Image (spheres, coloured by chain):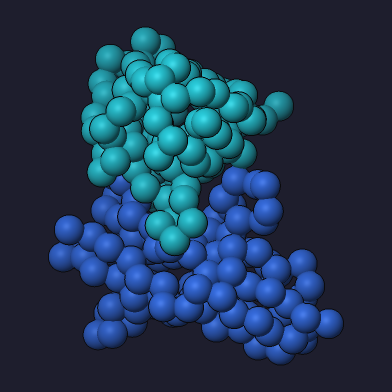
Amino acid sequence: AQSVTQPDIHITVSEGASLELRCNYSYGATPYLFWYVQSPGQGLQLLLKYFSGDTLVQGIKGFEAEFKRSQSSFNLRKPSVHWSDAAEYFCAVGPNDYKLSFGAGTTVTVRA
Amino acid sequence: DAEITQSPRHKITETGRQVTLACHQTWNHNNMFWYRQDLGHGLRLIHYSYGVQDTNKGEVSDGYSVSRSNTEDLPLTLESAASSQTSVYFCARGTLENTGELFFGEGSRLTVL
């Protein structure tokens, strides 16, 4: 069975500081991995995805993530956070049939 | 023109009533999904469909049903609403590139009193 763990429920970061969100997954084969962002009252927007190739993937809004098979991790990073990055972030894993399993989410608060 | 339209966006109902949440997509994608979002649980798969007349149960399907009579629509029905079904419901479709990710609607918030 596939599953995702996001160890941090809530992270507070200062504007301009770096951000790293952790994601650990359990999956039997090579996974398809995703990070989504959700602003209050909105749907989920895809930030980036990994399914093969270069293990460091670039996404929208200046985010990147690194796939580490040995650690079963897919951590999300951003070098310099903007106030507009305050949102909830979800990591997801699945095969290529769209049946994704999501983590519980990490809420990011950005302080001025 | 929104690619996925969910309606209603907000609904309050009473325990025991039947409720249907609509999901309409404009991309004619075969793959459509319903998830519910609850604090501390992230999103959990309720039902999904890979094409017309195809429906499948997800991990939290009890008390829910779907039907797929055309490509564009996947309505979600709560046969007899329960307070435990108070949640935010998201409809999603697959992508044309077939790279495994989902594209989500804006959600329907359901409150069962």
In the picture, measured across the screen, residue A38 lies left or right of residue A33, that is right
Q: Is residue A8 above or below residue A94?
A: below
Q: Nearer the viewer, residue B30 or A111?
A: A111
Image position, residue A78 (x, y; %): 62, 80
Q: Quadrant of the N terminus of chain B?
A: top right
Q: Which residue is at the front of the view, A40 or A61?
A: A40
Name, please, the residue furthest toward the right.
A112
Looking at the picture, how far across and down is residue B50, in whole percent? 30, 28
Identity of the residue drawn at 16% across and 65% down: A28
Q: Which corner quadrant of the image does residue B45 belong to?
A: top left
In the picture shown, does residue B113 fall above or below A7? above
Q: Is residue A103 visible from the viewing direction of this image?
A: yes
Image check: A61 left or right of B85? right
- Say which of A111 and A49 sits in front: A111
Give the residue at x 70% y 69%. Answer: A85
Q: Colour of chain A?
A: blue
- Image coordinates for residue B54, horizontal then vertical, percent: 26, 21
Residue at image point 60% right, 46% down: A43
Chain B image colour: cyan
Extreme-top residue of the structure: B69
Furthest-bottom residue in this view: A17
User: In this rendering, would B7 be left or right of B38?
Assistant: right
Q: Which residue appears at 50% of the width and 31% of the height?
A: B112
Res A64 seen here: no
| Coordinates of residue A42 in the picture (x, y in percent) | 65, 47
